Every structure is written in C-alpha cells, then in structure tokens.
Amino acid sequence: MTVQQTETARTIGKEDAKIFAQNIRRVYQIKSKDGGGITEFEAIRKLDLEVRAGEFFTIVGPSGCGKSTFLDMVAGLAKPSSGEVFIDGKLITGPALDRGIVLQGYALFPWRTVRKNVEFGLEVKKIPQKDRNEISQRFIELVGLKNFEDRYPHELSGGMKQRVAIARALAYDPEVLLMDEPFAAVDAQTRETLQEELLRIWEETKKTIIFITHGIDEAVFLSDRVAVMTANPGTIKEVVTINLPRPRHGIRSSAEFGWVRHKIWELLQNEQDGGGRPALPDQDVAAAISTTAAL
Amino acid sequence: MRILRKLLTEKTAILAFVLLWEVVTRLGLVNQIFIPPFSKVVAAMWFLIQNGYLVKHTLISLERALGGFLLAAVIAIPLGLLMGGWFRRIQLVLNPLFEIAAQANPFILFHIVILFLGIGELAKVSIIAWICIWPILFNTAAGVRNVDSVLLRAAQSFGLNRRQLFFKVILPASAPAIFTGLRVSAGYSFFLLIAAEMMGSSSGLGWLILYSQENYNIQWIFAGATMIAILGLTMDTILQIIERRTVVWENGATDALR
Amino acid sequence: MKKYEAVVDRFLRYSGLVAFFVLWEAAPRLGWADPQFLPPLSAVLQSIYWLAVDGELYSHLIVSLWRALVGLMLAALVALPLGFILGARCPETARHLDPLFRLLSQVNPFSLAPVFMLCFGIGEISKLMTIALVALWPILFHTITGVRMVDPLLVKTARSLTVTRGVMVSEVLLPGAFPTIISGFRVATQMTVFMLIAAEMLGAAAGLGWLVHNSAMLSQIPRMYAGGAFIILLGIIINQILLKVERESMFWRECPGPVTDEVVRSLSGKTRSLYVAAFACAFAFVLICGSQEVRRVNIQGLHSDKTASHQHNHGGLVGPLRSD
C-alpha cells in the first residue's frame, strides 16, 4: 500500500463516508493434510466499500464468503492481510467504543443480569454508577425489556437475549452498530418483530448500521443499500440501492419488494452457477481461521 | 518460525525438561544428593533392569493393578448399566450407599480388609478393585441415563426389541462415558497401589522405592518413580487408543473433561 | 397418587442406609461376624464419643484439616496463575507442554515422598509438599480447560469493548472458568484426602490417618473403626460442600427453560455473601488453630516418642504389617 493511495483514501473518507474500506485482502494459510505443505486460501480479495453516515447498510452473501471476517475488520478485531478500513477518515487499528457489535450467538455474559449486561460497556467507559443505572434503564426500555432487568440470560428467550445484546451495544453510545447475523438463531416470527423494532431503534437513535445476513428478505426489508458478496474469493459483486419507501411495515407483499428481492436473488444465484474456484473443505478453512484467531 | 514450530512437536517439551534436569544437577544448582542427574537415573534403571529387580517388581505391581482394575470393570460396568437403565427403585435405594462407599478412603478400608483377609495379595487386589469400581459405576450409570431420548425414540420407531435396543443403541451411546470412567479408574488404581505397597508389602514398585529409601539410594528412588510415571502414562495412553478405536464418533470430547 | 409415590421414593432413598446401619449393628451381635473384627455400630459410636470427649478427636481432626488446606492452597497458588497464563495467553505453549504435564502428573507423589523427606526432613513440609503435588495437577488441568472453554463470543465481545487485560480476566475469564475450576478443586480435594490419610499412616505423630493406623497397631478395633468412620464422614461433608458450590457457581449454565413470570433463583446475594463469610471464618479457624495444634503435636512428638520418630524415619513401617 503506497502512501499516495492512503492519502486519497483519507480524503474520500473524510468527505462522504462514515466507513471506508479499500482494497481489502485476507489470506489464510492452511496446512495441507498430507504433510508439511502450506497452501494459501484467499478469503477476501479486493474488497472496496463505503458506508455513509446514518445509513442502514447490509451485506448479504453465501456462508463462507468472508462477510463476517470483514465485519470483524471494521470492528478492529481482525486485520486485513492488505488494504485498510477507515472510520471518519481515521485508520482502524483496533477495537474502540465508537463501534458497537452484536453477534449471532447473543454473547451475553451468562453470570450477569440483563441490567449488568447492558452496563458492561458503561463500566469499561468508567461511567459512575448512578448514570449507569439511568442509561441502562433507558436502553432496556428502548428494546422493550422493562421488568426483566434482574433476570439472567438463561431465563430469557432467544429473541429477548438478542434484544439485550442490542441494548448492550447501544448503551455506550457508539456511532456505528455492527451486526453479524443477529437474528439467525431466532424463530421466523420473532425475527420479523425484531426487524421492525430494529428499524424503529435505528430511526430513534440515528446510528449508522452495518448488518450482515444471508437472508435476502431481511436485507431488502431493512436496508438503504445492500452489498451482494460472492465467495471464493470473497468480494463485493454489486451494491444495490433499495429505494423502497419508509416506514416499511407491510411492504413485504408489495410488487417492488418482490422485484428487488428477485434481483438480489439472481445476483447470488448466478454466482453459484458460475462456479468460480472449487471451495476448500469447510473444516480446513474453519481450522485455519481458528488457529489464526488464536494468534 | 515455521521450522521452529515444527521442531516443537509433541515430545520436545519432555526432552527439554529432561535436558534441564540434567544440566541443572550437573552444574550443581541443585544438590546431587537430593536430585541425581537424569543420566544417573537412567543408569540406575539399566542396572535394575539387568539384575532383574525392576522387571520383577513392575510385573508384580502391574499384576495387582490390572487384577483390581479388571475385577472392578467386570463388576461395575454391568451394575452401572443396570442402575442407569431399568431399575429406578433399586437405584434409589443403592445410590446413597454408593455415594458414601465411593467416599470411603481406601487406606482405611485397607486396614479393615487386612483384618478379614489377612495381608496377602487378595487384600491388595480387592482394595484396588474397590477404588476402581466407583468411577466406572457412576460414569456408566450417568452415560446410560444421558442417552439422547430422541435417539431412543427413533430406535423404538424401528421396532427394536429391548435386547436390540440395549446392544444397538444404549451400549454404544454410553460407551464414551464408560471409557471416561475406565480412564479415571486406571489413574486411581496406580496412584493408590504404590501407597498400598509402601504400607504393607514386600514386593512391587512401591516396596522397591521404600527399600531404596531405607538404604538411602536416591538414584533407585528416582528410577522407580520414573518407571511408575511411564507405566501410568502408558496405561492412560492405551486406554485412550482403545477409546478412539471403539468410540470413533465422539471426537475426543471426553478428553476435554479429563 | 403422585404424593404417594414421592413418599415411597423418599422412604426408599433412606432405606438402604438404614438397612446398612441396622445390619452393621446386628451382624456382630447375632454372631454373623466376629465382633473382634467388626464391632457393632454402637460400640464404634461410643468410641467416637470417648475420642471427642477427651479432645483427641479435635486434635487429630484439626491437624488433618490444616494439612489438607495448606497443601491445597500451595497447589492453588501455583496452579491457578499458571493455568490462567497458559490457558488464556499462550494456548500454543500449553498444547506443547501437555505431554510433559501428562507425564509429570503420573509421577506418583508417594514415590517422591522419600525424596521430600530427605530434602525437607520428616516434618510438616514434606507432607505438605506431597499433598500439594497431588492437588496441583487436577487444578492446573481444569483451570486450563476452563479458561479455554470460555465462550469465544464473550471474549470477542469484551475485546470489541476495549477492555483491559485485568477486566478481561476478572469479568470474563474468571467467571466463565469458575465452575470448571471448582470441579478441579473437588477432584483435587478428594485426592488430597486420600493421600493425606496415607501420608499420615506412613509417617506422622498425629492426624486422623495416624489415629486409624495407631489403633490398628494397638488392636483397638473400635477406635480404628471410629477414626475410619470419621474420615469417611469428613470426606462426604467436604465433597457435598464443594458439589454445592459447584452447582451454585454454574447456575447460569442450566438449560434454558420456557420463560415464565416465576423465576427460580438459586441463592440471593445476601445469603450468598453470608455463606462466603462462614467459609472464610472456617478457613481462618482451621489455619490458625491448626497451625498451633500442629506445632504442639510435633514438639510433643519429638519429646515423647523418640522410638516412634526413629521408625518414621525409616518409612514409618510398623512390624506386623510387613509380615507377608
């Protein structure tokens, strides 16, 4: 990466992008099974992306296309092999409290009550106890969990747990909310409720949201723009602007919704037919990723 | 870096430890009277092997440990299968008794067993068996109890009779738990046998160590201790291998619970 | 019908124990067993009573407890930090060290007991080292496993919140690994009690193990049974306490049930801190009184039975047991 490129990135980033990713590449080294040989697996290749402030931006793609890895990079939890990610024109070098993350498996601290979970980020920020209570109460109510403050996660349903996770990520007031398939583990009906609530929360709090999913329906329903990612290697095929009017309650049955949905479906479908390189066995990739993560 | 990691394969940690032991003692950082260098321990082992001491006493100890262990397995596995499965009432009666019996300190029992059986081989073997029974029994019972009920319903839908259900579903499904119990027991058996041999015996590795101590022969003590450690490790490894061969589907999950 | 079954179940649960005790009492009295070898339960209880009255029981009990506790603490002092460092900071190193640890954990502390005696003398230190060596491995292995089994998503979440290393350990790793660590302590304690009794039988001037051994040598069979019964009772109590702590500490691991308004909560915060305080007091008591008693016993041992200590020097083997 040359200095010049970095400079241009900065200027673009400063002017109109909240999050700006440039020429991201991620390579995993995989030990082949038969011996000491090491092959390279390119998880992400030449990924460029910009997300505007206050935007609801969704990345949709097949499993294993590297979308979660990319989100980790934005969160500062993983580093690209080459390329850079900027927030407000500043290079992301590690995690910080200007980005909140919501993960698929809830990731609630099981030994903390709902309130204590929501307050976790505030504790890290060293906000005094009194303000902490006030803030956590506000966000618990925002996600509709009043009267559940003193429950433990194992006493909640999946949908409620995910609400707690959202409240926790919002409580320390990050500018960007990163959501990694947050609704994948809840049942269909709860998912739709959560989607509508997320939109309400987004409109109330005016956060920038980057949302990862493999559900086309979900992506279209929620987003301003949808980036379609392809696998092997992972890169962005097309960014589709969703010009559906808001609020979107009941929009799923409309013809426009169906049309946009079909368009994205086709983009993903072509990819699968098109083949590309044969995928590596899942297990190897997973093993390689986990060892890299351990380092 | 890659070469370094390759070098650091399984056994290097052990080799490094042995090397450290040798160097530290040779340089006199530790008094050689207390901890002899590894090479001298190996020499002592070689000497003991040549004059037949080590082999003889190892075989005696192994015989006792294996005898007790096998006796325990023969008693505990069927009992555990019965307890975990069908006779809930019997289990209710026996469970508190077993819980207490499992806590019963083997060395206390040793003294009592000696009263009844005298101080022969039978006392030692039965005390080892007593120690080994409980982990096998509890693990087997728990394994049977925790067989996935979905699995059972699926099997019943195939119209299996009780016998088939037992041999085709319950037994394989509880095998991992049984093996966990066996491994725990094997560890216990060796651990406590040494103490038992020190307490009342005139043969076996435990006695050999005690005898070396009485003659202030530190090198022999270390030789015996090394032999015991190797034997214990071998037993554990053998059970692990058997486990992997028979319980291929478990993916070493029991390993994490060691 | 259900109520009836519950009553039957409860009856059955205790019937086995009751039958056992009745049999114990009846067998020697009815001549099914030689009362010389198996004294009836009442005789054993009586000798427990006498031991308790003349203060001998307290002395042996506190000495044994002190040894077990200090040995466990020594082991924990090494194993816990090491386990955390290996489990959290350098899992690769832990993986490489695993074979070595497995080998070392097989080193029987009894085989090294003679070496400890040569290094540290036959005093308390060699006994404590023996016990600590037994307790070290279960605690270490469980700590490493526990730390490594903490949900990686939680670690990831905490990292995204830029927590410091200290907060990561105290708020994420420690609570996450706690139940596993406690079960390591339970295993360690059980082994410790086993080994402690054996160590006391092999060479000591006091302690419950010595009590049993000494009674056996003097052919005071009821006294031997009394000591044995007391050790077993002690083992059960300690095990039950640790099981309770283990279950309490993993209340959050229970499988998720349906959400109801009624929340089944284990202990409230207040009762929990009460329990913790009680534990701390008991620990302090054992530590302080135990160390005094141990010192007293050891000094007495030096003065009163020189012959016995001479014998202990040679492994503590006593004549009749070696006659096979």
Image: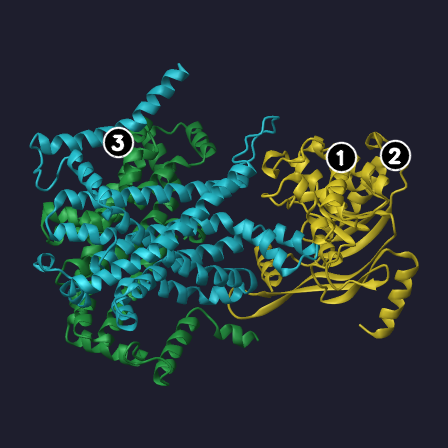
Chain colours: A yellow, B green, C cyan
* Amino acid identity at mark 3: Leu
Q: Which structural element holds mark 3?
A: helix
x then y, percent, for residue B244: 39, 53
Q: CA distance from mark 1 to mark 2?
A: 22 Å
Q: CA distance from mark 3 to mark 2?
A: 70 Å
Q: Which residue is mark 1?
A: A141
Residues behind callouts 3 and 1 on a single chain: no
Q: Which structural element holds mark 2?
A: loop
Q: Judge depth for marks 3 and 2 and give the one in front.
A: 3
Callout 1 amino acid = Glu
> Which is in the foreground here, disc 1 or disc 2?
1
Is A170 left or right of B32, judged from the image as shown? right
Is disc 1 placed on a helix, strand or loop?
A: helix
Badge 3: residue crowd in 10 Å (few <14, some 14–19, many ≥20): some
Residue sitting nearer the eye, C173 or A265: C173
Q: Indicate the quadrant where residue B92 lies.
A: top left
Q: Chain of mark 1?
A: A
Image position, residue B201 (x, y; %): 14, 60
At x 19% / y 52%, what residue is drawn?
Answer: B67
Side of C315 where C173 appears, left or right? right
Residue ID for mark 3: C17
Q: Which residue is mark 2?
A: A247
Residue found at x 43% / y 58%: C76
- Please state the horizontal and vertical placement of residue B164, each as a whole percent of the image: 34, 33
> Badge 1: how crowded within 10 Å, few (<14), some, or many (20+)?
some
Q: Is residue C306 above or below residue A74?
A: below
- Would residue C139 be seen by someone viewing this image from the given angle? yes
